[in-house]
Image: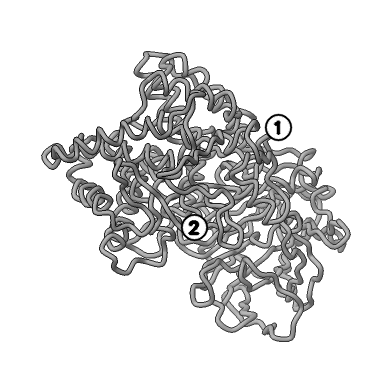
Amino acid sequence: MSYLKFDRRLMANLDESTQREYIRTNRKGAYCCSSIVGCNTRKYHGVLVIPVPELSENNHVLLSSLDLTIVQHGVPFNVGIHEYEGDIFSPKGHKYIREYNVDIASSTTYRVGGVVLQKEFLFCHYTNRMLQRYTLLEAHSRTTLRLSPFLAFRDVKMLTHRNDQYHGDYGQAKSGVTFCLYPGYPTLYLQLSKAHNFVSDPHWNERIEYIKERERGYEYTEDLYVPGYFEVDIEVGESIYFSAGVEEADPDTLAQLFAEERNIRTPRDDFRSCLLNAALQFYYRPDATHGYLLAGYPWFGVRARDLFIALPGCTIYADAPERFYRIMDTVLPDMRAFMRQEGISKEIRNINEGDIGLWAIWTLQEYARWSSLPDMVSRYGDFLDELIHYYLRNVHPNLRIDDNGLCVMTGDGRPLSWMDAKVNGQAVVRREGYLVEVNALWYNALCFCREALPQKWTPELEELLGRVQQSFCDTFINQHGYLFDYVHPHSSWRDWSVRPNMVFATSLPYSPLPKATRRSVLEIITRELRTPKGLRSLSPKSDGYQPQCHGTQWQREQSYYNGSVWPWLLGPYFEACIKLYGRSAISFIENTLIGMEEELQQHGVGTVSELFDGNPPFKGRGAISFAMSVGELLRSLALLEEAKSKYDTQILPIIRYE
């Protein structure tokens, strides 16, 4: 039985099935994405969505959807589905679905009368090509398939409408046709493995609606160009292959290509294997030498902070150290270029933010933990030394080392930390001065430097380290047993909000806090911030708490860091629990991970969402697949196994939901 399987009852319930989405990527920035029922609910959805850098930095939807019609006795049964104005769904193909499952290739099984048809699809690695396989399992009479492409040729952040500028003529390809609706776009090749007829029937399918965009307060109605349809006969037991790509394929090899792509995939048969698949989908190789992690799907690019936080979990703890090496070899030259005030790549964003280097040092720590300290030093020791001394020179544009040894972050109201929601360019949660997690990272970085590079450690650095530890305790510890979130330097302002940023002062390998304070901090985090899906970004007892992240962009930005739950914070939280509670933390962590496993069947199928609502039922929100969430859960599984090994506890399998 498949690990991720959805039966006919759920698929027929559009309130449920349209809320669940899948994402498949090709490691080159392109993807295929929709709801599991096949109804596009976002402007980002599409069968073939690819980068077209000549037109914009965003991805572009070429093929929005591909409607399937099963013809029996001359009667067509369209098993596609779209939503139109007035909450009208047509055609109602969901009523023919008998099963949807995600094992290796996503598979949908339809029953129309005496016909049982299976549709599977794969997105090819490192090439902009989507493959579908149609297999006729049962039929009592002649069966014909019709495939109707819905073409968009537009930026994912825009919508298209009926117009006179499109180029509707089609060209010929081997066993298929080609389209290019607008200048500047690549040619789209649509091909089948079997002889067929392409019936020209050009028209605009108007007023398609995307309910997720309507919920988010954006334009949500689109017109799509339908040039006609492919018509092909199919026999019982026969498989027919369909290819959509920007290069011509050899129709005779589509079956072989599908088999090859299928054979190199890891089955999604338990919690960890799903996370491994999700982690691989963030891997982005724009060319033969460079590598990155995308922050999430379907709308994020490469972001420096997300990359370093997600990197250990999505590479070394995902049994893929080669990805770690390639990404570090790509990103570290950009880090060095920034420190030397030279030009940097446009691929990676926010590399200029003050805490990025501190997260990079944490990443090196995790690598040393996984490999060895000597190996880390031999590979990255020079970079670690350069980075520490860059901070000590006080030349960063918005971070400096104060006289008390702490890091001060200043700006013009822009976000300065991972809490980066903003409205009109200004941070929704404005945090300036001494930020608690930044200074926990700074203390940890200095301690790691002392451990890794003892030959370069000086009495002056030792004095600085002692100063940082004392100043951290004096500045952040309050009389209620937790830590201020941030403190303005040289003033009496203290932010008393109970936020999760203080968890890093208890979880990092080196903590400036005494053990009693660490225990008190963790107890308050557990009592006020911990949920089954992660840590809240603000305690319900603090002013401004907003438990639901929905509505317009302004409403969402206001709630992201004022109550929404962030699953990536489970990584540091679990690490702190193990450090402070040892063996007794193991069952608690296991139970929490079992709860997270349920999410694989919810918002983003087989992956983990960006965030969740702060109150029950903790609905998944934001990006359907988020690198920091996936990475830190993979690291959490590694932490759990390490703790069980340390305390000689039986390693029990995570419960499977089938």
* Lower position in the chain sequence, tag 2 or tag 1: 2
Say which of 266 and 465 sits in front.
465
The amino acid pointed to by label 1 is Pro
Residue 455: percent from left, percent from top? 11, 39
Q: Say how many tags the image has.
A: 2
For the view shown, which residue lies furthest in the front direction? Answer: 491
Vertical position of residue 472 compared to residue 587: above or below: below
Residue 397 in sight in this render: yes
Vertical position of residue 190 compared to residue 431: above or below: below
Which class describes the residues within 10 Å of circle 2: few (<14), some (14-19), or many (20+)? many
Q: Residue at x 44, y 19 (%)?
A: 651
User: Where does label 1 land, which residue?
Assistant: 616
The mark closer to the camera, 2 or 1, is 1
The answer to whether 537 appears left or right of 233 in the picture is: left
Which class describes the residues within 10 Å of circle 1: few (<14), some (14-19), or many (20+)? few
Say which of 341 and 436 sits in front.
436
Residue 604: percent from left, percent from top? 62, 45
Vertical position of residue 653 compared to residue 344: above or below: above
Q: Specify the label residue 527 is tagged with.
A: none
Q: Residue at x 68, y 41 (%)?
A: 546
On the image, which quarter does residue 234 sit in?
A: bottom right
User: Where does label 2 land, which residue?
Assistant: 26
Residue 86: percent from left, percent from top? 88, 59
- Cβ atoms at labels 2 and 1 below 8 Å apart: no
The amino acid pointed to by label 2 is Asn
Label 2 element class: loop
Say which of 631 and 125 sits in front.
631
